[in-house]
Image (cartoon, rainbow, N blue to C red):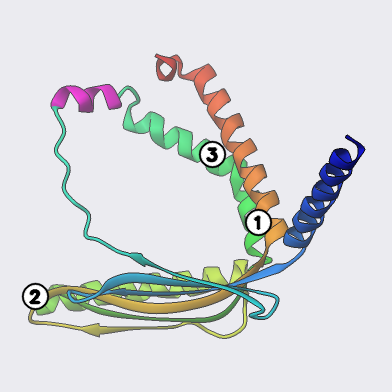
Amino acid sequence: MLYFYSVLIFIAIIILLLIFFILFIHMRVMIKTVYTNEERFMNVKISILKNLIKFTFNIPLKRPEEVKEDAKNLEKKRDLSVLQQIDFFINLYSNAHTIIIQFLKSVQIYNLTYHIHFGVGNSALTGISIGTVYSAIGIFENLLRKFTILHQPPNIDITPNYYASIMETSGKIRFSFSVRKAVFTGLLLLKAYLKTRKDFKATHPIETN
């Protein structure tokens, strides 16, 4: 019996050491995405301790399938109005935005490249759309500079197609973050979500039906 308890204590110590080790390391992630008519996939590479431990896996990206539902089922899902749903997400953002921002400020982005091949089948509309997209890209880059540690400017470009309706993308991002901070942030977000849901139920009894 003493031997059995000694083994359990040893296993518990090993588990605690592994948890301590995992929580105080930085994880580097590189994500490559390709979305064209021929290929649709996401390749994710995770490395720990400067490539001493590496994991690689592919995620196939499929076109979203159109799902038709009965009107009765849709009405059951619409217990909450659109305004009530917006109110919930605004409250959730209010409770969680500081947590998210604090985590993002510790995220280091080493490289971000992205290419978009885009067209809507009309030259005038394509030109207007690309101008709008470039404005959105500028806002996105400013947000990255403000809320993350950006080691070099992102490289995002668009190739217009004025004669066909097309949307093809490919890109790669390499970043790192603290596992400990990620776990802690996840727990805080869960707490913020539960608090928001509890407050929301108190003011919107229809959700409890």
9 up-or-down from 82: above or below: below
Q: Label 2 near label 1: C-beta < 8 Å? A: no
Viewer-closest of 51 and 126: 51
Residue at screen point 21% across, 28% down: 74
On residue 20, the disc is none
Residue 158 x %, y %: 29, 82
Question: In the image, which is nearer the foreground, mark 1 or mark 3?
Answer: 1
On the rendered structure, is 184 left or right of 75? right
Image coordinates of residue 113 in percent, x first then y, are 43, 82
Residue at the spot of label 1 = 182
CA separation in Å, label 3 and label 2: 40 Å
Query: What residue type is disc 1 on?
Result: Ala
Tell me the crowding category of disc 3: few under 14, some 14 to 19, or many 20 or more residues within 10 angstroms, Cα based.
some
Label 2 sits on what residue type? Answer: Asn
Front residue of 208 and 97: 208
Which numbered mark, 3 or 2, is in the foreground of this view?
3
Residue at 73% of width from left, 67% of height from top?
25
The disc placed on residue 92 is 3
Separation (CA) of disc 1 from disc 2:
45 Å
Q: What distance separates the C-alpha of mark 1 from that of mark 3? A: 19 Å
Residue 57 magenta-highlighted: no
Foreground of the two, 165 or 191: 191
Q: Which mark is residue 122?
A: 2
Image position, residue 32 (x, y; %):
41, 76
Please state the extent of the stretch shown in magenta in the rendering: 71-77
Please tell me whether mark 1 sits on a helix, a strand or a loop: helix
Residue 76, picture quadrant: top left
